[in-house]
Image (cartoon, rainbow, N blue to C red):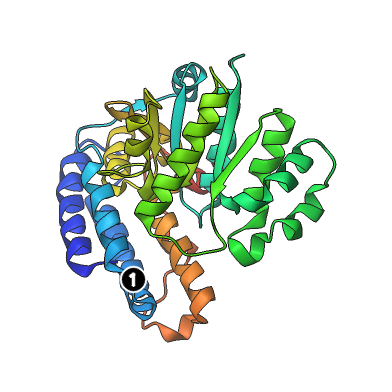
Amino acid sequence: MNNTFKKASLAILLVVLAACVAGADNVSKEEFSRLLLVEKTLHQQIDEMESELKTSKQLEAYKKSYLAAVPKGAPRPLSDAQIAKTLATARYVIMGDEHTTSQAQANTVSVLRMMRASKEPLTLVIEWVDISFQKQIDEFLAGRIPLKNLRGKISFDKLWGFSWASYSKILSAAKQLKTPILLVERLKASHSLASRDTFITKTIADHAKTNPGMRYLVVYGDYHVLGDDHLSQKLAKSGLKPQIILIGEAREIYWKLLGKLKDPAKIGFAELAGGIYYVRNGTPLERSMAYRDYLMKMLDYSKSDFEEWVGPADIAPKTSGRNNFEALHNR
């Protein structure tokens, strides 16, 4: 994570919070400030570990392009019923996935169910299984391979390595909902982000040509779904539009919604602008903690390697008002 960019983002967040807190009966300015300090500590720990990974300039530029494309206006909260109505008729939905938070995968299942409310055909496109395993995925969906055997057959732990418990729920939902899955990713070799987006676009476009009327739910890492010449834009240029885009990596949007709704349990979906919607794939603190813990496991870090430690209790908002913030972690 780039320190300069992080500090600028936190400065913007402070301005947002100052504007929002005045109307919040149950969240004090002091509590917002405490949460920001907790987030800052998490970012410092992430920075320390990422420095060992030597993040590429290409990835930093890709991330910056994504963040620049996130709408800056006031979000309009939507109920599940409202977003479900939009998704039921959507032709192309591109959804961001936060790999380290189980809420993101649970939301994928929810969106899939919402889209399946329509009788029109639907294909699910996923990032986390290599394209060479299309036959194995098809056999699982047809009931010829049990879920417990599929994990090894698609080299999930070797090629992806995030939570099988979370991601396997998406496979089970697709099977239950009789939704075909299209594999478009080449995990067995390294490719540039631009090359990946181009290959994914061509694969989906070719599939669409032979399946007229097909609808698509494309679920990919957050930074793919927005940005100049990123995946969603390349898909649109190929004629795969109009699109509904669901993003979860938008910290300022979350804080604005918290200031408006005053209850984190009420934050789910929100309309942003131009067919772009927010989905809460975990709170900013939950996302940062999950990513930190992932890096710790990968780099063999322990609690004692940090001067300060942030645990689950530290990221839970504290309130003296009527709302129960514990619902945030039970949603």
Task: Assess disc 1: are there few (<14), some (14-19) or many (≥20) residues with their C-alpha within 10 Å of its C-alpha.
Answer: few
Q: Nearer the viewer, residue 110 or 274?
A: 274
Question: Circle 1 — which element?
Answer: loop
Task: Report the number of discs.
Answer: 1
Residue placed furthest toward the top: 119
Residue 171 coordinates in the image, percent (x, y) = 68, 42
Residue 330 coordinates in the image, percent (x, y) = 56, 45
Residue 318: tell me if it is visible. Answer: no
Q: Which residue is mark 1?
A: 55
What residue appears at the point 44 percent right and 68 percent down from the top-left corner?
A: 292
Q: Is residue 187 left or right of residue 50?
A: right
Q: Nearer the viewer, residue 331 or 277?
A: 277
What residue appears at the point 46 percent right and 21 percent down from the top-left corner?
A: 91
* Above or below 178: residue 324: below
* Above or below 22: residue 133: below
What residue appears at the point 66 percent right and 56 percent down from the top-left corner?
A: 164
Q: Is residue 23 left or right of residue 116?
A: left
Q: Is residue 273 left or right of residue 303?
A: left
Please name the amino acid that badge 1 sits on: Thr
Work out which quarter of the rendered image holds the C terminus and state it.
Answer: top right
Residue 196: tell me if it is visible. Answer: yes
Please tell me in which quadrant of the rendered image residue 287 appears.
Answer: bottom left
Residue 222 coordinates in the image, percent (x, y) = 40, 48
Please tell me in which quadrant of the rendered image residue 42 appears.
Answer: bottom left
What residue appears at the point 60 percent right and 53 percent down from the top-left corner?
A: 130
